[in-house]
Image: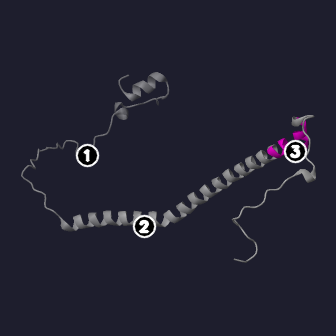
Amino acid sequence: MATLGGLMEWLGAAKAPARREKSDFRLRALPREDILLFVKDIDNTGVERVADTRETLASVGMAGGVIATSILVIALLLPGTYSLVASHRIESLKQDREKLVNTLRSARAERARLESPAQVEHWAGREFVAPAANAVLYAAPSGETVAKLSGGE
């Protein structure tokens, strides 16, 4: 059972024909399998690198091209991105304005409800007496003129 054929026989998976040779389960001989390889250590300590200016210029040119292309793409996308951010900010400010206007309207409605004549009479009770029309005194204007509608002086 040391070979694959023996294992298959033991498992009963391979029904062997009536006649079988021993070489059925052996690997065939590989061509040139008797060739040996010799590896020699190479000492590169005395080797100096020769600078290739064309390769250096190509590398620098490629790096410069990538940087220039990146800057160009960013410059092309920047106005659209700025307008998108600005429009988002404008919309958020409009929503904030709507909230504040609604708050102001509700505050004015509450003030009008509290200052209504019925509410004032309720607060004053029986002690409140409305003044007569001829009992109201109006103060005379001061000597200085603050605003004028006619185009005089």
Query: Is the residue marked by circle 2 packed among few (<14), some (14-19), or many (20+) residues within 10 Å?
Result: few
- Residue that numbered label 2 is attached to: 72
Question: Three-letter amino acid code at disc 2?
Answer: Leu
Q: How is the image coloured?
A: one colour
Residue 16's spot in the image, x, y percent?
46, 29
The quadrant in which the C terminus is found is bottom right
Residue with the most extreme bottom position? 152
Residue at 82% across, 56% down: 138
Helix, strand or loop status at disc 1 = loop
Question: Three-letter amino acid code at disc 1?
Answer: Pro
Give the mark nearest the N terminus, 1 or 2: 1
For the stretch drawn in magenta, the main secondary structure is helix
Helix, strand or loop status at disc 3 = loop
Query: Is the residue marked by circle 1 packed among few (<14), some (14-19), or many (20+) residues within 10 Å?
Result: few
Residue 50 falls left or right of residue 27:
left
Give the mark nearest the N terminus, 1 or 3: 1
Magenta-colored stretch includes residue 114: yes
Q: Which residues are magenta?
A: 111-122
Residue 77 falls left or right of residue 42:
right
- Residue that numbered label 3 is attached to: 116
Say which mark, if any, is on residue 31: 1
Residue at 91% across, 44% down: 130
